[in-house]
Amino acid sequence: DAGITQSPRHKVTETGTPVTLRCHQTENHRYMYWYRQDPGHGLRLIHYSYGVKDTDKGEVSDGYSVSRSKTEDFLLTLESATSSQTSVYFCASEGRGNTGELFFGEGSRLTVL
Amino acid sequence: GENVEQHPSTLSVQEGDSAVIKCTYSDSASNYFPWYKQELGKRPQLIIDIRSNVGEKKDQRIAVTLNKTAKHFSLHITETQPEDSAVYFCAASLGAAGNKLTFGGGTRVLVKP
């Protein structure tokens, strides 16, 4: 596996609280992505990054923000968590050489009560 | 934007039989079609991909076919084994570096011994 890790791996929080998930990669990959995985919906793109301080919205970006201050770190923030954001979140980075292959982190399971 | 439909959502096969998963996509400009396998509790991993300049690609017991005219592509697994039990996701994108993958809803495959 490419060196991509997520933290925390599990989190339980209450509605209305902010939550930040961290993705860290050691491959010097330029492109990074945050997806959420829900039954029947596959993986849906939340936000992505083309490089340091260069981010854009995906298809389900409402209620989420991201930041990328260093190549290796991509943070996902839920500004005010809601129960609909209970999900498994996957970070991914894209390998070099235009292969298109995504390397995923282990996932972060978030429960919003 | 792109929309990817995947069928069936669940598939149960007897060990040794073949399994076929089908996907359709909406954006005729898409030209990169990967398949990811996700074992229970693990991260998705690329197993095979195809680009629009070829109609079929094989790798041991797995193969992918693409029909650009009809905008559909399929994954074929022959001689299924218990370790093939997993969730499989198809995806589509424009194929260049940094292009965002749109995933199908996933197919849960169960191989019965």
Image (cartoon, rainbow, N blue to C red):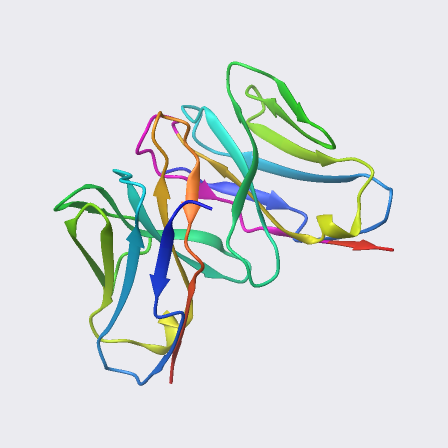
Q: Nearer the viewer, residue B58 or A27?
A: A27
- Residue B36 in the image, given as x and y percentages of width and height: 55, 43
Magenta residues, start to end = B94-109
Q: Is residue A18 above or below residue B91?
A: below
- Which residue lies at the image location 41% right of the left edge and 27% below the top edge? A99
- Which residue lies at the image location 30% right of the left edge and 57% below the top edge? A23
Point out the image quarter for the C terminus of chain B: bottom right
Asked whether, in this view, residue B16 is left or right of residue A96, the answer is right
Q: Is residue A96 above or below residue A54?
A: above
Point out the image quarter for the N terminus of chain B: top left
Residue B63 visible in the current orientation: yes
- Residue A24 in the image, given as x and y percentages of width and height: 29, 55
Q: Quadrant of residue A19?
A: bottom left
Q: Quadrant of residue A2?
A: top left
Residue B106 colored in magenta in the image? yes
Q: Nearer the viewer, residue A3 or B49?
A: A3
Q: Is residue A91 above or below residue B70?
A: below
Asked whether, in this view, residue B51 is left or right of residue B23, the answer is left
Asked whether, in this view, residue A77 is left or right of residue A112, the answer is left
- Which residue lies at the image location 23% right of the left edge and 49% below the top edge? A72
Q: Main secondary structure of the magenta part?
A: loop
Q: Is residue A17 above or below residue B77?
A: below
In this view, the residue farthest toward the top is B53
Residue B108 visible in the current orientation: no
